[in-house]
Amino acid sequence: MRPDLIDPHIVRNSETADLRDSCKSHRERVMQLIESTVSDLSAESNVDQLSSVVLLGAGNCLDVDLIRLARLFQHIHLVDLDVAALSDAVADANSTDNRLQIHAPQDIAEPLLAMMPDDLSTDDTTRLANSLKLLSSENGVADVPESDIVVSLCLFSHLVVTLSVLLTDDNPVYANALKAIRLGHIRRMLSMLRPGGVAIFITEIVSSETAPKLIDVSDSELPELIRELVNDNNFFSGTNPSPLLAELNLLSRLPGGPETVDTIDPWKWQMGDRTYAVYAMRIQKKIPLKEEAAPAADD
């Protein structure tokens, strides 16, 4: 992995580490979403506690309450680039003993963080095709077992930031590379789930930096404002829900693809002096159909 691609994310974690209080409302929305999903899966499986959850892009764990999660899961897998941020978050939740397992440093969009601009150049179409294939692959995190729930904690936008270091958005390859990363992210989440498990994709879509109306908009007015902003092309690159839903529809035709997709109403996230609009999708993985036993041969 390239240090120049990793370091900006680590610096951001360091700069936001003290913003836990300002994230309280956002964290509560994320936790309610996880807890309601746990309740649904527990009822389906008739168990009191699920086996495991994977948190992708956990970082400082500002989005979640690790102590609450430890009451819901036997194992909590924390996946991120930043070893120090995860270690500090675990230390702050030391009452959860060995339930918390750190997986870092990890390139969750491997090989994105090792790529060079030449890997995405039209000068070598074979190399370009291979790069896009790798970015869209379903390779998960090798040492994380299949889990009940996988949560992407506002990680996708950071993957896009890394892509923007490699390519400008007017580059002819940019749109295909962005689609490959988004498709790969969803496929990797699904690959890390047990059959019937649920992926929760959470992402920021726009901030008050380009949409100052976010600061004062009410929760009830937020969906309409987001529709207006999307129509005006005022959103973070790649986060428009429509292409994502189209890609999920394509994946639903495959074994191990989505069985159902639920879009969660957006909410606001106050991160320091900036307000974000956030939305989520809850994606349940298919359970393979049981093959019928072959009829017995006649004597």
Image: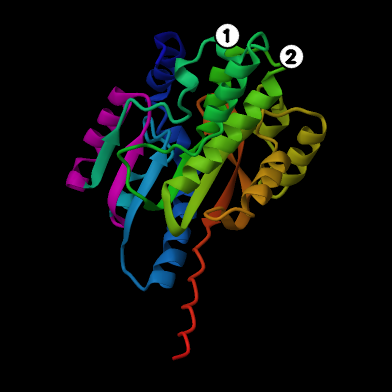
Residue 202 visible at all: yes
- Indicate the position of residue 15 as horizontal and vertical percent values: 41, 18
Q: Which of marks 1 and 2 is nearer the N terminus?
A: 1
Quadrant where the image shows the C terminus: bottom left
Number of numbered discs visible in the structure rendering: 2
Q: Residues within 10 Å of mark 2 (few under 14, many from 20)?
A: few
Q: How crowded is mark 1: few (under 14 residues within 10 Å), some or many (20 or more)?
A: few
- Residue that protrudes farthest toward the front in the picture: 299
Residue 83 within the segment the image draws in magenta:
yes
Q: Which residue is drawn at 64% across and 27% down?
A: 178
Which residue is disc 1 drawn over?
A: 118
- Indicate the position of residue 97 as horizontal and vertical percent values: 17, 45
Q: Residue at x 59, y 49 (%)?
A: 281
Q: Give the range drawn in magenta.
A: 71-98
- Indicate the position of residue 115 as horizontal and vertical percent values: 50, 15
> At numbered mark 1, what does the secondary structure look like: helix, strand or loop?
helix
Q: Which mark lies nearer to you, 1 or 2?
A: 1
Front-lying residue, 112 or 57:
112
- Residue that protrudes farthest toward the bottom in the picture: 299
- Per the model, the C-alpha gap separating discs 1 and 2 is 16 Å
